[in-house]
């Protein structure tokens, strides 16, 4: 119903020289207010949109076959934790569609050439006249014989069989910058599949998958390491050796260290991606209480306990659920 209303209004414009002149000069905006308070109701950029919907003769600009960009490709690369931190260079092998080296993209066997399509006379478009209540209209479609290329291959290339491209294997070097993380990608511009009809090639996207480390976990640019120390080291302090991605480093544990204390090794983390500086290595100290003691150890700890006093000091802070009960008056 809406279409017929729009057609009727379009018909009024086509049969009114004044309205038609306004439309030709200003487009649809020139018709606002010309048909009463509501104006004309056909909300389109041109009359051809309505006729295209009804009779299917639009699409003139897209009928011919223009340059077509090549498809993008994906390659999944596995990295060690250290390779992600410091960067690496790897050679990969891909298979992609490239312009046929035998026919150079013509699709025809060497020594022959595509001929002009007789269906569309080389235009890639087929025009057919249709009659309607408004008169004769031209319906333009992609030529079904040449698929819009304007050419017909009578002797297809023996390598690509007329497709203009062939599958080729290529080896490429991929530079992975320092500081990448799991799930990131590296783009190799122009290393995807070759285009058609003079179109540009696509890109190759290398997806990075970083293996977990035995000791470290990553927190943005920082590396986190959990280290166990005994109660004597925590109480008296110590100098310990811890692993880093650069090798072993000495770390001073201060006397009186509590469980969960955090120490930092500056600039021992992950380099900033395409920038300067590095993150830190965060060392979390876990104080391990022994579960099995020798008689001598038990005696020594008993003596220590006597000097410290046996009185139990309760925590002053109330637990979360106790505070909730207090707030609710329970």
Image (cartoon, rainbow, N blue to C red):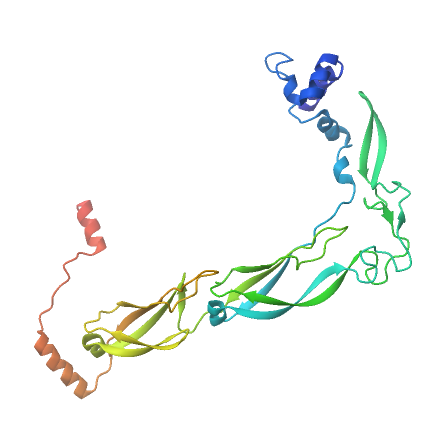
Residue 41 visible here: no
Instruction: Residue 232: name its quadrant.
Output: bottom left
Residue at 28% from the left image edge and 71% from the top image edge: 285
Instruction: Residue 213: name its quadrant.
Output: bottom left
Residue placed most toward the observer, 109 or 284:
109
Residue at 78% from the left image edge and 45% from the top image edge: 65
Residue 39, horizontal then vertical, whole percent:
62, 16
Q: Is residue 69 left or right of residue 330?
A: right
Residue 13, horizontal then vertical, whole percent:
72, 16
Question: Residue placed farthest to the front in the image?
Answer: 276
Q: Is residue 82 left or right of residue 129?
A: left
Q: Is residue 201 above or below residue 51?
A: below
Residue 87 visible here: yes
Instruction: Tell me how many marks there are.
Output: 0
Residue 225, horizontal then vertical, whole percent:
35, 70
Residue 250, horizontal then vertical, whole percent:
31, 77
Q: Is residue 153 above or below residue 280?
A: above
Residue placed most toward the observer, 178 or 147:
178
State which quarter of the image contains the N terminus.
Answer: top right
């Amino acid at each position: 119903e809406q279409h017929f209303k729009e057609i009727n209004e379009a018909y009024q414009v086509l049969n009114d020289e004044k309205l038609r002149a306004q439309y030709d000069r200003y487009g649809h905006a020139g018709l606002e207010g010309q048909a009463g308070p509501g104006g004309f109701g056909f909300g389109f950029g041109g009359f051809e949109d309505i006729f295209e919907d009804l009779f299917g003769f639009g699409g003139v600009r897209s009928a011919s076959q223009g340059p077509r960009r090549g498809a993008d490709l994906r390659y999944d690369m596995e990295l060690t934790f250290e390779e992600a931190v410091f960067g690496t260079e790897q050679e990969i092998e891909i298979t992609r569609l490239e312009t046929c080296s035998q026919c150079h993209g013509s699709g025809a066997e060497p020594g022959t050439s595509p001929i002009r399509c007789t269906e569309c006379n080389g235009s890639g478009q087929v025009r057919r006249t249709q009659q309607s209540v408004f008169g004769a209209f031209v319906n333009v479609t992609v030529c079904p014989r040449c698929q819009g290329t304007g050419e017909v291959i009578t002797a297809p290339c023996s390598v690509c069989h007329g497709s203009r491209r062939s599958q080729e294997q290529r080896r490429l070097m991929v530079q992975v910058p320092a500081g990448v993380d799991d799930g990131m990608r590296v783009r190799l511009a122009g290393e995807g599949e070759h285009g058609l009809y003079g179109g540009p090639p696509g890109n190759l996207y290398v997806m990075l998958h970083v293996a977990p480390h035995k000791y470290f976990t990553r927190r943005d640019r920082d590396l986190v390491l959990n280290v166990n120390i005994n109660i004597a080291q925590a109480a008296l302090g110590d100098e310990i050796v811890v692993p880093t991605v650069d090798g072993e480093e000495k770390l001073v544990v201060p006397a009186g260290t509590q469980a969960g204390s955090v120490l930092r090794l500056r600039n021992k983390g992950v380099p900033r991606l395409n920038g300067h500086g590095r993150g830190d290595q965060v060392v979390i100290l876990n104080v391990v209480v022994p579960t099995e003691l020798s008689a001598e150890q038990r005696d020594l700890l008993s003596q220590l306990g006597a000097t410290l006093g046996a009185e139990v000091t309760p925590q002053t802070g109330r637990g979360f659920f106790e505070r909730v009960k207090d707030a609710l008056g329970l």
